[in-house]
Image (tube, rainbow, N blue to C red):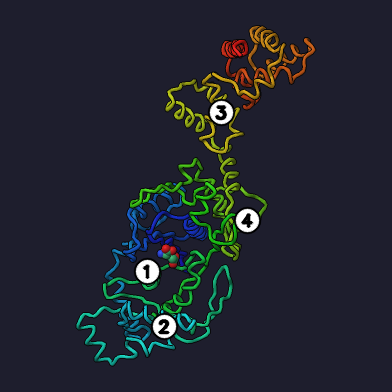
Amino acid sequence: MAKKVRVRFAPSPTGPLHIGGLRTALFNYLFAKKHGGDFLLRIEDTDQVRYVEGAEDYIMEALAWCGITYDEGVGKGGEHAPYRQSERKAIYAEYAQMLLDKGDAYYAFDTAEELDAQRKNYEQHGETFIYNWHNRQNLTNSFSLSPEEVKERLQRGDAYVVRFKMPQETLTLHDLIRGEVVVDTKLLDDKVLFKSDGMPTYHLANIVDDHLMEITHVIRGEEWLPSMALHVLMYRAFGWDAPQFAHLPLILKPAGMGNGKLSKRDGDKMGFPVFPLEWVDPVTKNISKGYREDGYLPEALVNFLALLGWNPGVDQELFSVEELIALFDLEKVNKAGAHFDIEKIKWFNHQYLQKMPLITLVENFSSVLAGKEISASKESLTQIVTLIRERATFLTDFWELSHFFFVAPHSYEAKAFKKQWKENSAEIVNSLIGVVDSLTDLTPAHIESQIKDFITKHNLGLGQVMPLIRLALVGEMKGPDVFSIISILGKEQTILRLQNLIQYAKEQ
Ligand code: GLU
């Protein structure tokens, strides 16, 4: 029987989760659900220096907001708990020892200053310092020191690290997205796996945990591709089966801004968030924008991210999560980076807003209005929302698109007034008041026919009449269909606003 698929999202709590990280979580989730497998959340917090207060809660809240649920992990528990690496500290020393015993790892005692001096020395010769086979016997470690000396240093409590002994070979790796990747391991360094303070580095903790948590597929960002050889070699050294790997393409800057990775700076420059939720830096108190706070719907963000680097191979763009799960296939994930596109995510948001149940939109808008101390009947709100929703991209657009229904204009856009108000305008508006007053039916169709009859009867043009009505009702040349506005405002309010315009014109 094939092994049950188990994947994990393993972020480090070093700050807010970038949307690239969110996409990694999403792809893991889709893959797990597609294969009836498990999705885990593991927090990789072994790097105490980079630990940021609140980042872990942020990650969990962001996943929850997007509906990316996990089966095991921090905040949830599970068979392989704990899922926070800082709570698993005791486990790793044993595995570092295992590699030492097998001769695949060794002790090194070089101080930071010594390594720095080496680095500088290499740089002076135009070379890069790599700690590996070619110089390890000249550095301070188990290769250059006698076993007694190593023992003595350890007993004395000298600071040390455990390094992986990188072999010298040509290694062929297989990546589910990139295919074969050939690596000359001679060019790689002897990575630090463990430190004398008892803390593992990312590499050791990651491999040990993936093994103990029975991870079958490692799906992560492209920035980890250079670590794949080391990881595969570590599995081999331990004598464990390696999981399959898939390295997702980068999310790149918007088209036209170069081919670099999308950064927070790009977002700041162009006014869009790169984080799912707003983030307040615990130290500087600087605020970074979030999609949630900017009025985006999680469904829109999820749909957008799913297609960033993955081509489902069908002529469709809007997908429910169930559809995404059914179609998801790592082999259709592109190798090349995908350019971020803020207009596209706005488009998705607009689409999802149109799909939201009318009642939800009405309730939401009603609470926005309550905050402004405006109350309106459910019936009229339903009419208003129906009329304007098509023009809204965000929930927050509703007020901007409809404020004139609730507050009569107290001024008129100067340029429009100047252009529209002619000698006979007062007379036209006056007659319109009569037309509105005699309406027997307030459906937009009836209003339209009555006003158009009036226009024809008086030999006027639409252009002489309609802009005046709009100006009177809205205050500017914007808004939905005028007949629908009259229908919602009602006779009394429409007449009042037409009178206000005449009065205003008199005062000019
Ligand atoms: N902790 C790593 C990160 O922050 C995880 C990389 C991996 O998935 O192996 O991205």
Q: Amino acid at mark 2?
A: Asn
Q: Quadrant of the C terminus?
A: top right
The residue to which callout 4 is attached is 256
Q: Amino acid at mark 1?
A: Asp
User: Residue drawn 40% across and 77% down?
Assistant: 191
Q: Quick one: 107 or 348, which is closer to the camera?
A: 107
The residue to which callout 3 is attached is 385
Secondary structure beneath dot 2 equals helix
Judge depth for marks 3 and 2 and give the one in front.
2
The residue to which callout 1 is attached is 209
Q: CA distance from mark 3 to mark 4?
A: 37 Å
Q: Amino acid at mark 3?
A: Val
Q: Quick one: 14 or 140, which is closer to the camera?
A: 140
Is residue 236 something one can see in this rendering? no
Q: Amino acid at mark 4?
A: Gly
User: Residue drawn 29% across and 79% down?
Assistant: 160
Which quadrant of the render holds ligand 1?
A: bottom left
Mark 3 or mark 2: which comes first in sequence? 2
Give percent across and percent down for residue 302. 52, 50
Q: CA distance from mark 1 to mark 3?
A: 51 Å
The circle drawn on residue 121 is 2
Secondary structure beneath dot 4 equals loop
